[in-house]
Structures are given as structure tokens and as C-alpha cells.
């Protein structure tokens, strides 16, 4: 996830671009850059690492970059570290530096998205004499456009559509061509892009807030469409290069609502981004119907030689480890232990080269997780980081990195990063099962297909959110909530309970269902809410009996179960159904109603959902 902006008109472009990027910073903030041109002059490119204010300082708030046509970018790294050389814009020329300064190139561009076949395209372009200065997929696209532009000499729209036919993946692209001084060309597939129009000006952006200050008249450019922007004029084309007419839409949102994509809170937006986060993460790990972990450096031989796995993390990331423990052990028969990172150093865990220590972290900066990683390395274990923020400390220090592609997460309570971590570990488990021979080729193929169906199933769970909204209004005054389950359902209960307590401030606990009767059941009173997670068919009956024990002591019951299993409905007061899937992957679905329940309960209590009290997004102290 990155943010792109563009402006062409009569005003100075750089301050407008910086202002737009500021409103897109939630989409990425590891580096930023601008390319601006003044009439026939060459485009000047300026980039800076870190937050946007570094770029603003470097350009004197845009004043040192004269010109009335330009494009800008704020980056969330997916390919290549968050460095100056990888920051956008990227250029088509064979320059030796980072592509900054006055650039001779015919094409300059910014991109949001992921080009899946960039490796093969890069090789092709290298055979044609192109040299690359960055590790990004974007530089490959810009150079591919340049290649077609020069080969066919028909013009920018033709070069762009040829490129679109050739690339696989997602993109919102904004490009400037040396021969077209005050024009910007844009293209889109599966990444957001809007085009704004005003008198003698045109704008483009990944999202509405970036341009709302200047115009409310926008075109929503469709998948596989191209736009050509010049001051006061926007033309759109289909993949054949034929001009098309798009409806002009008037934006009615206020600026704050627009930043959250129309959602009331970032948390709700991020809950809805889960299908995309899971799909993107899975797609980055599957090639030609097989799991491919080469990007992380984990080989099949390495997986085969493992004697044990230790997963360590904090909070929700630790809950992912708890779920993965059941999946890996059941699928691949490899012993897994899960340790809280803050406790890791106080254990004398035996480990050696045949131990894989997996550190899970959204931020990649959590102090306890980092300390655990360092200790594991000291003890000689092989280490793998499952991290969302590219180039973060944990990612840099681990022997291997498996990136989740959830994009920036703004709400303090994690949702989409959790789901992306879960699918990454599921993919690892499936690959281990294949390598260890505990899954046949047929089962392996089936498991991959099942994982691929998860995003669409999450979307279906989200369609039922109104029922949870209604239910949460009934429980908003609860004092205590208990989440119970067995096996994987226990792991999901842990996350459900944390989501509830951290944003609603209602005391909640997660218990392995069978453990309640060993003490905690004394806390059950009239109307205490007990939520049972009931997705593992061989354990449902037992957990339902544990819930019945609570009911006979006055508890009010909610159950989450799989569609088609209507027996649960007879035993509980409120049932939530999730789509059927292979039971190993059910956590990805069952967690969603629990996230929504926590969210709506917090809203009903009038609390600050995105920034709960006493918490920080990234915990960098031990
Ligand atoms: C809870 C939550 C935290 C984090 C934990 C680890 O919603 O977000 O429990 O999961 O602080 O953070 P990372 O994943 O950044 O290491």
C-alpha cells in the first residue's frame, strides 16, 4: 500500500503534491518523493526517506521545486528496503544514482501496487540494455513503458496499454513523458485511483482526501483503464486505446471521513481490508499453484531438517503463534512451542541449528520480540521473522523474512495484520506438510485452493456485520465476558478476548473450555456473557457442554460456528455463522465476528476506538 498524487495546472505543483501526500501518509510513510517539471524543462526528482516532513524540509515546502506539473508518492515498501534508491518516483533512464535530480529520462513514474512478474520482465529489459538502480517492481514498470514507447513510437497511451497487457499484479500508475510537458498519464488495475478535475487543472490521487481541498468533481477510473490529464481536461481510454466516457461524480464526504475511506474509524476500515491483506499475502507466497518461500530464503531442505519450531511474539501476534501451533503440529507433525516474547529470555529453552525460531511482529520493532530474536540467534537457532513493516529492525536482523502484505495499520488494535500473519503461517504449515510427506500431492493442492478461498469467505462474514452491531448494543454494559474454545478455537478465543478488552475496556478472559471448571466457573453469575468458539467439529459437543454448565449458573451464551451446523442454535442465545472451510484455516474466518463485536461494543460505549487509553501501536520498551 502506497499513496500517489499528481497535479497539472497553472499553480506551482510541488506544494499541492506535498499537501496531497500528507493526507495519504496513512497509506505508507517509509519514504516519499516528487517529480516536477516546468514547461519543456526536464523533470526534477527529489526523494527523502522517513516521514513526509523530511521531503518537505528538503524541498523548502516544495518552494525549491518550480513547475506546474508533477507527481508524488509516499511509500510503504513491498519490494526493496525503505531506502532513498528504492523511493519513488522512478525513471526510465540508465542512471547510476538513485534516479534523483534533473532526469534525462523519457518516462518518470510513481506506482502503488505489486507487480508479480517483475522478475521475468526485468530480465527481458536487461537483455534489451536496460540497467536497474533499485530493487523495486516500479522501476521495472517504468522501464517497460519506456521500452514500448520507443519500440512502437505510437505514443504514451499505446505504450501504457501494451505494458498493462504484459504485467501481472495490481497497480495505480502515474507517469510523465519528456515529450508531453504538461500532461500526466495514469493507469489502474486493482489499486485505488481517482482523477479530479477543476478549472484549468487536473489531479490524481490514491484516495479522495488528497484532492478534496481543490476539487470535489472526480472520475473513478476503472480497472484496466488509462487516463490522460492536462490542465482542465481529462480523457480516458480502455485497454484497446479507444477513448471512453466516464461519469463525473461529486464527492459529498467531509475531509476526515474521506481519509478513512468513508468508514467511521480506521479499525473498521482495516477490518474490511482483510480480504485484500490475506489475498496479497497469500499471492506473494504461491506461484503456479505451489507455495514458494524463496523470497524468504526458507528452503524445502531446511524445513525437512527441522527438529522443532519455537514461535515467539507479543499480544495478538502471539495469538497467531498459538493458532499456528495447532495447524503446524496437526499438518506436519513437527513439535511447536509458543512463548511470549517477554518471557522468552527467562526460559532456558533448548535449541540448536535444527530449531526454527519464528518471530511474528506487525511493526517489526517490538522490543520484547526483538530481544527474543537476538537471544535465539545467540543460541544458534535458525530465525524467521514474519513481519509487516519492510526494513524494520526485526526484519533486518532475522536470518529469513516472510513479509505480510497488509499495508500500514493505523488503528492500535490489530486486525488485518493479524489475518495476514495467520495466512502466512498457514502457508508455511502447508509447505511443511508437503515436504515432510504428511500431505499427499492431492491434499497439498486442495489445501492451497482452500487458502485461496479465504478472502472471499472473509468478505461474506463481513456482510453479516449488522447482526453483530445489534448484539453488541445489548452487551455494551457487560462487566465480564468469557471467551472459550478448545484447540484452535481456544487460540481464536484469546484474540477475541483481547479485541474486546483493549478497545471496550470490558473485562474479558479467554479460557480453554475444559479448564473453566477448575476454578474460573465460580465467576459466572446471572447474565455473564460466555462466547463459545465452536468450529472444530470433534470438539464442538464438549465445548457446548461446558457452555451448558455456565448457562445453568445463569450465563448468557453466544456461539460462533460453521454454516450448516445448526445444532448449536438450540443450546445458545445468539449464534453467528461463518462459511465452511478446511478446519485448519477457520481462525481466519472466526476471528472476524469477534473483531466486529469488540469494535461495535467500543463504539456503543462511546470510546476512542482507534486510540484506546494507555496503549501504543508499537511497543518499543521492554
Ligand atoms: C493488539 C495488538 C498488540 C500487538 C502487539 C505486538 O490488538 O495490536 O497486542 O499485536 O503489541 O505488536 P507487533 O505485532 O508490532 O510486534
Image: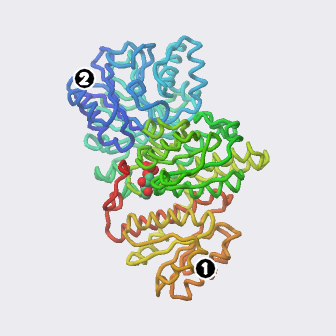
Q: Nearer the viewer, mark 2 or mark 1?
A: 1
Vertical placement of 102 versus 469: above or below? above
Q: Quadrant of residue 575?
A: bottom right
Residue nearest the viewer, comparing 88 with 295: 295
- The reply, left or right, for residue 534 in relation to residue 472 is right
Please say whether residue 414 is visible from this viewpoint: no
Report helix, strand or loop for mark 2: loop
Count of numbered tags: 2
The percent position of residue 2, horizontal first and vertical second, equals: 41, 38
Q: Which residue is mark 1?
A: 546
Outermost residue on the top side: it is 129
Q: Are marks 2 and 1 in contact (CB under 8 Å)?
A: no
- The reply, left or right, for residue 526 in relation to residue 248 is right
Vertical placement of 402 versus 278: above or below? above
> Residue shown at 63%/46% (left/top)?
427
Please say whether residue 569 is visible from this viewpoint: yes
The percent position of residue 595, horizontal first and vertical second, equals: 47, 62
The percent position of residue 417, horizontal first and vertical second, equals: 48, 50
Quadrant the N terminus occupies = top left
C-alpha gap between disc 2 and disc 1? 68 Å
Outermost residue on the front side: it is 348
Q: Rate crowding at label 2 as few (under 14), some (14 to 19) or many (20 or more) other CA atoms within 10 Å.
A: many
- The reply, left or right, for residue 125 in relation to residue 366 is right
Q: Earlier in the sequence, mark 2 or mark 1?
A: 2
Q: Which residue is mark 2?
A: 65
Report helix, strand or loop for mark 1: helix
Q: Quadrant of residue 296?
A: top right
> Residue shown at 46%/64% (left/top)?
596
Q: Rate crowding at label 1 as few (under 14), some (14 to 19) or many (20 or more) other CA atoms within 10 Å.
A: many
Amino acid at each position: 500500500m502506497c499513496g500517489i498524487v499528481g497535479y497539472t495546472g497553472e499553480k506551482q505543483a510541488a506544494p499541492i503534491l506535498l499537501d496531497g501526500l500528507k493526507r495519504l501518509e496513512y497509506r505508507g510513510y517509509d519514504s516519499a518523493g516528487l517529480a516536477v517539471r516546468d514547461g519543456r524543462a526536464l523533470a526534477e526528482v527529489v526523494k527523502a526517506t522517513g516521514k513526509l516532513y523530511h521531503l518537505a524540509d528538503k524541498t523548502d515546502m516544495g518552494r525549491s521545486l518550480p513547475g506546474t506539473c508533477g507527481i508524488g508518492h509516499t511509500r510503504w515498501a513491498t519490494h526493496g528496503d525503505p531506502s532513498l534508491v528504492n523511493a519513488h518516483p522512478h525513471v526510465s533512464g540508465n542512471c547510476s544514482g538513485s534516479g534523483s535530480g534533473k532526469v534525462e529520462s523519457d518516462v518518470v513514474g510513481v506506482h502503488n501496487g505489486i507487480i508479480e512478474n517483475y522478475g521475468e520482465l526485468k530480465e527481458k529489459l536487461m537483455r534489451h540494455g536496460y540497467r536497474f538502480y533499485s530493487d523495486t517492481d516500479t522501476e521495472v514498470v517504468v522501464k517497460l513503458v519506456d521500452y514500448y514507447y520507443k519500440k512502437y513510437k505510437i505514443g504514451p497511451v499505446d505504450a501504457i496499454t501494451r505494458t498493462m497487457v504484459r504485467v501481472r499484479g495490481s497497480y495505480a500508475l502515474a507517469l510523465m513523458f519528456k515529450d508531453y510537458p504538461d500532461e500526466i498519464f495514469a493507469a489502474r488495475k486493482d489499486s485505488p485511483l481517482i482523477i479530479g478535475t477543476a478549472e484549468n487543472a487536473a489531479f490524481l490521487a490514491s484516495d479522495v482526501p488528497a484532492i478534496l481541498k481543490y476539487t470535489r468533481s472526480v472520475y473513478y477510473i476503472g480497472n484496466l483503464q488509462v487516463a490522460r490529464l492536462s490542465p482542465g481536461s481529462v480523457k480516458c481510454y480502455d485497454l484497446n486505446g479507444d477513448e471512453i466516457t466516464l461519469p463525473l461524480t461529486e464527492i459529498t464526504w467531509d475531509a476526515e471521513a474521506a481519509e478513512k475511506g468513508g468508514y467511521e474509524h480506521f479499525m473498521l476500515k482495516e477490518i474490511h481490508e482483510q480480504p485484500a491483506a490475506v489475498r496479497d499475502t497469500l499471492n506473494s507466497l504461491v506461484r503456479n499453484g505451489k507455495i514458494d518461500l524463496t523470497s524468504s530464503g526458507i528452503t524445502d531442505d531446511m524445513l525437512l531438517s527441522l527438529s522443532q519450531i519455537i514461535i515467539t511474539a507479543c499480544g495478538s501476534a502471539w495469538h497467531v503463534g498459538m493458532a499456528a501451533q495447532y495447524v503446524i503440529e496437526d499438518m506436519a507433525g513437527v513439535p511447536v512451542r509458543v512463548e511470549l516474547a517477554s518471557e522468552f529470555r527467562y526460559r532456558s529453552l533448548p535449541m540448536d541449528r535444527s530449531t526454527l525460531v519464528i518471530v511474528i511482529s506487525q511493526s517489526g520493532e517490538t522490543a520484547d520480540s526483538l530481544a527474543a530474536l537476538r537471544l535465539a540467534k545467540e543460541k544458534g537457532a535458525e530465525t524467521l521473522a514474519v513481519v509487516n513493516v519492510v526494513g524494520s529492525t526485526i526484519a533486518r536482523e532475522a536470518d529469513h523474512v516472510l513479509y505480510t502484505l497488509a499495508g500500514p495499520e493505523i488503528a492500535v488494535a490489530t486486525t488485518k495484520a493479524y489475518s495476514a500473519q495467520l495466512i502466512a503461517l498457514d502457508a508455511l504449515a502447508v509447505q511443511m506438510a508437503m515436504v515432510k510427506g504428511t500431505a499427499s500431492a492431492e491434499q497439498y493442492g486442495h489445501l492451497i485452493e482452500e487458502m485461496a478461498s479465504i478472502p472471499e469467505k472473509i468478505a461474506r462474514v463481513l456482510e453479516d456485520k449488522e447482526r453483530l452491531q445489534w448484539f453488541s448494543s445489548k452487551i455494551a454494559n457487560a462487566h465480564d465476558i468469557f471467551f472459550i474454545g478448545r484447540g484452535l478455537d481456544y487460540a481464536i478465543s484469546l484474540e477475541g478476548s483481547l479485541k474486546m478488552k483493549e478497545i471496550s475496556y470490558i473485562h474479558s478472559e479467554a479460557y480453554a473450555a475444559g479448564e473453566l471448571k477448575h476454578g474460573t466457573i465460580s465467576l459466572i453469575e446471572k447474565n455473564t456473557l460466555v462466547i463459545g468458539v465452536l468450529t472444530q467439529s470433534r470438539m464442538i459437543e464438549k465445548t457446548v457442554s461446558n457452555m451448558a454448565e455456565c448457562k445453568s449458573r445463569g450465563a448468557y451464551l453466544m456461539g460462533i460456528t460453521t454454516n450448516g451446523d445448526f445444532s448449536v442454535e438450540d443450546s445458545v442465545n445468539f449464534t453467528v455463522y461463518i462459511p465452511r472451510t478446511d478446519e485448519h484455516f477457520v481462525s481466519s474466518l472466526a476471528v472476524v465476528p469477534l473483531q466486529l463485536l469488540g469494535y461495535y461494543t467500543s463504539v456503543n460505549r462511546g470510546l476512542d476506538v482507534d486510540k484506546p487509553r494507555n496503549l501504543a501501536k508499537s511497543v518499543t520498551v521492554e
